[in-house]
Structure formats: C-alpha cells, structure tokens
Image: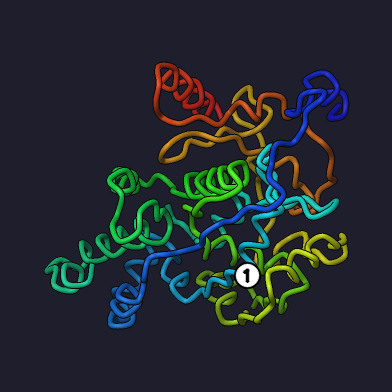
Amino acid sequence: MVERTQLEKGDSIAVGYMSELSGYTRISVTKNNLQELKEIWDQWGNETKQLFYGNYGDLPYMLDVQIDEHLFRALVQFWNPVYSCFTFGEVDLMPTVEEYTALLRCPRFQGLILTHPDESKRVDVFALGLYGLMVFPRALGYVDETTTDLFHRLSKRVTSVPTILAETFRSLGTCRKAGAGRFVGCAQLLLAWFYSHFRLINRVICRVFFEDYSPLKDIVASTRRVDVPEENWIALFQNIQSKDVEWRAPWMIPGEILYRCGSFDWVPLLRIWGAIGYAPLLVLRQFGLRQFMPATHGLTQSEFAYRGADYKKKVGEISSAWNKT
C-alpha cells in the first residue's frame, strides 16, 4: 500500500531534477555570549530551578553544551534541503518532533532577572532570554521581537518544539541553497541530538528512566569535545554505514509518531518567520520501524515566508490541517 501511494502521488523531486547546491557550504556558527545567563542559573536555588523545569523544560542544560564548530560545519554539508534530512551516504536521519520533545522534556537579562520581586516572573524573563539568545538567535546581542511574540504563546501551554524544529530545518536549508550563511537555530540542541545517534562519538550512557530523568543532562555529562578537523569529519560522514548509527536514541521511549497532518502525506510546520515541510516517514528506522520512501509530492513547495499576498491563505490551510490531526 505504501509503495503504491508513492507511485501514485510521487516524489518531491521532479523528473530531470538537477541539484543546484554548491559543493561546499560556508556556514557561521557564531552565537550569543550566554555566560551571564549561566551565572544567573548557577545562583538560583533548587526550588526556583524546579519551577523553571516545570514551566519550560530542560532548556538550561543546553547552556553547558559546547559547540564543536568543526563538527557542526561538517554536518551542514550533508543536509538535504529537498527532504529536510541529513543524508550520509545511504543513511537518512533527521531530528524529529518526538526526539526534541524528549530531549527538552517540554511540559508544555541579568539585572532585570535577578532583581524582579516575583519569582515566577524571574523564571519567565530568564526563559525569554534563553529563547531569544540561544534557541532562536536571529540577531546577535538582543532578543528579536518575533521571538517575544512566540514566547507569549507559550503561556497558553502551546509547545515550542515544532517551531524549534522548523527553524532548524529552514536555516540549514537556506544556508545549503545559498552556499553560505549564519545558522539561525539552536546549534546546541542539534548537536545533542546528533551525539545520541552515532556510535562514532563517545556513547551516551542513559540511566533507568525515572520520572525526573533528563536526557540532556546525561548527554552534557557524557560527551566531551574532541579536536577533529572539519575535513576529517566530512571524510568520516561520507563513509558512514548503517552499523555506525544508533538508529533509536537510547533515551527515546516508543510512543505515537506524528507522520502526517490532515490530508498532507507529511507535516507542514509553521515557523516564527515562515513555514517548511517535515517528512518523518523518511526516517522511521529511528523508531525501530521498517524504512521506505513515502510519497512526498509537494514537500518542496511547502517552504514560504510570512510576506506577500498569498501566505495568509497557506497558513490558514496548514492551521486547518493541524486542527484535524
């Protein structure tokens, strides 16, 4: 049935498609200085930290994730913007909504933060700093206004995971298509995801699952930066085989998988500044299921920005599809 659907509805790549990607993508991983946020977090007591975890998940652990720029730049060379996934030879992998949700355990600036009289408000302001400076760092040195708008929606218990994932896909794809650019996404979270899937890196040891178990905390404690040149990483990725991959992340508990949305054979994700397509059926092996090529017709046309005359109609169609999911 799946193969028949693929034949009938087709692939997202048209017949005769020629890749326009440059041979090498020059990407900047320049990030905001997060030292002040880390110092604030270290000053807080356990009660305040638990309040933060309960409201916003495990975001603070990412303050301790070291960004290996050589590894990150090498990773970008293997991003496939047509399908929004990493393609290492015959191995396809992508961070999924379920994996990012598990990593972040989503439940749904210095002077200002430390002196605010209301503890819950201090937690909120600190979370806004994390989102604006680390998760969605569109501009260096300040929090983008659009990020603030998203943050207000979080108070209504709307998860930020699809938006985090969408901005990651969009930024990787934009840089690959242009052959250069600055990564506007959460590099720390993407690397934490990567470390859990590859046996080539120090294996992440996961403990028995307790209610307060944090995959991110274990990843930070278990990984160490190694001084490997970018060209060595690229050569390594070019020769990856199935046996080198930890297909299901060791901290991932099997559950329901979001693989389609309404009448779409994939999932359109609304970003902060636009929309992009997401096809988790391409990487079912990450959930211990049989892998196949799903129908992805229309996936490449799903990316658009929130400008022009037609985008509101497209957003309405996507919102309607999500309501039916």
Q: Is residue 277 above or below residue 289?
A: above
Where is residue 256 shown, x and y percent of the image? Answer: 65, 46
Question: Which residue appears at 44% of the width and 56% of the height?
Answer: 107
The quarter of the picture where residue 239 lies is bottom right
Give the residue type at disc 1. Answer: His
User: What colouring style does the render use?
Assistant: rainbow
62 or 52: nearer the viewer: 62
103 or 186: nearer the viewer: 186
Q: Quadrant of the N terminus?
A: top right
Q: Residues within 10 Å of mark 1 (few under 14, many from 20)?
A: some
Where is residue 201 shown, x and y percent of the image? Answer: 72, 75
Q: Is residue 281 above or below residue 196?
A: above
SS for dot 1: helix
Question: Which residue appears at 61% of the width and 64% of the height?
Answer: 72
In the rendered image, which residue does mark 1 sit on? 70
158 or 317: nearer the viewer: 317
Q: Is residue 112 above or below residue 283?
A: below
